[in-house]
Structures are given as structure tokens and as C-alpha cells.
Image (cartoon, grey):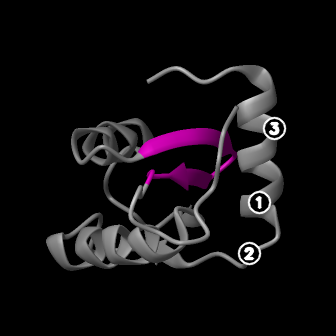
């Protein structure tokens, strides 16, 4: 799904308030890390992930894998990814207009 500039700016502002939730390192994007990212995004909808230089996978391949799991990469700043996954069951969910 494509978001407007204002929607992306809102998501960036919300994600920047939070610390980096996970680091992807030497093992790459494993199933365990992916499941933990999905669980965290289910609770918070937005977050940041850092891809370390020791990661054997290309950062673009990681973005594709995240997209296959319906995780939207809002923004990429260097080796930090800002992630968003809508959860319509949350009481205080993020509303994008």
C-alpha cells in the first residue's frame, strides 16, 4: 500500500520516539527475528530495526522479506529501517488520514 507524504511523516515521527527494537546481525533475518519483529509490530504498529554491517544479507533483500510478511518499510535511513504494520484490533491504534 502506498501512503501519502503526510502519512509517512506521521509514521516517522511516531517511530523516532521509540528506541531501536531489534538489530539484525551476523545471522541475518532469521525466522526467530522475523517473528519477534511481527510480534512487536502487532503490539505497537510502528518501530525501528537496525541492520548491522556484519549482516550477510543485503539490506534490499531484507526489505523484500519484510514486505512479503505485510510489513511496510516507511523509510530507510542508512542502515535503520522504520517499519509499520497496521493492527485493526488495537484499542489505541494509529489512524492515518
Residue 4: image location, x then y, percent: 69, 20
Mark 1 or mark 3: name the one nearer the start of the chain: 3
- Residue at the image position 53 percent from the left and 53 percent from the top: 83
> Which of the labelled discs sits on residue 79, or is there none?
none
Image: magenta residue range: 72-86
Residue 84: image location, x then y, percent: 52, 51
**Label 2 CA crowd tier, 10 Å (few <14, some 14–19, many 20+):** few
Secondary structure mostly taken by the magenta-highlighted segment of the chain? strand
Q: Does 74 lie within the magenta span?
A: yes
The alpha-carbon separation of the residues under discs 1 and 3 comes to 9 Å
Name the residue beneath numbered marker 2.
18
The outermost residue toward the front is 91
> Which of the labelled discs sits on residue 14, or is there none?
1
Residue 18: image location, x then y, percent: 74, 75
The alpha-carbon separation of the residues under discs 3 and 2 comes to 15 Å
In this picture, is 59 found above or below 30? above
Q: Tell us which disc is closer to us: 1 or 2.
A: 1
The alpha-carbon separation of the residues under discs 1 and 2 comes to 7 Å
Q: Are marks 1 and 2 in contact (CB under 8 Å)?
A: yes
Residue 6 visible in the snapshot: yes
Q: Element under label 1?
A: helix
Q: Element under label 3?
A: helix
**Label 3 CA crowd tier, 10 Å (few <14, some 14–19, many 20+):** some
Residue 69: image location, x then y, percent: 24, 48
Name the residue beneath numbered marker 3.
9
Amino acid at each position: 500500500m502506498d501512503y501519502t507524504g503526510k502519512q509517512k511523516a506521521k509514521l516517522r515521527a511516531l517511530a523516532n520516539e521509540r528506541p531501536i527494537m531489534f538489530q539484525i546481525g551476523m545471522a541475518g533475518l532469521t525466522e526467530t527475528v522475523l517473528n519477534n519483529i511481527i510480534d512487536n509490530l502487532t503490539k505497537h504498529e510502528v518501530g525501528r530495526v537496525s541492520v548491522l554491517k556484519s549482516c550477510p544479507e543485503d539490506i534490499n533483500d531484507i526489505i523484500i522479506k519484510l514486505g512479503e510478511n505485510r510489513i511496510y518499510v516507511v523509510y530507510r535511513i542508512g542502515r535503520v529501517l522504520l517499519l509499520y504494520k497496521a493492527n485493526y484490533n488495537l484499542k489505541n491504534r494509529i489512524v492515518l488520514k
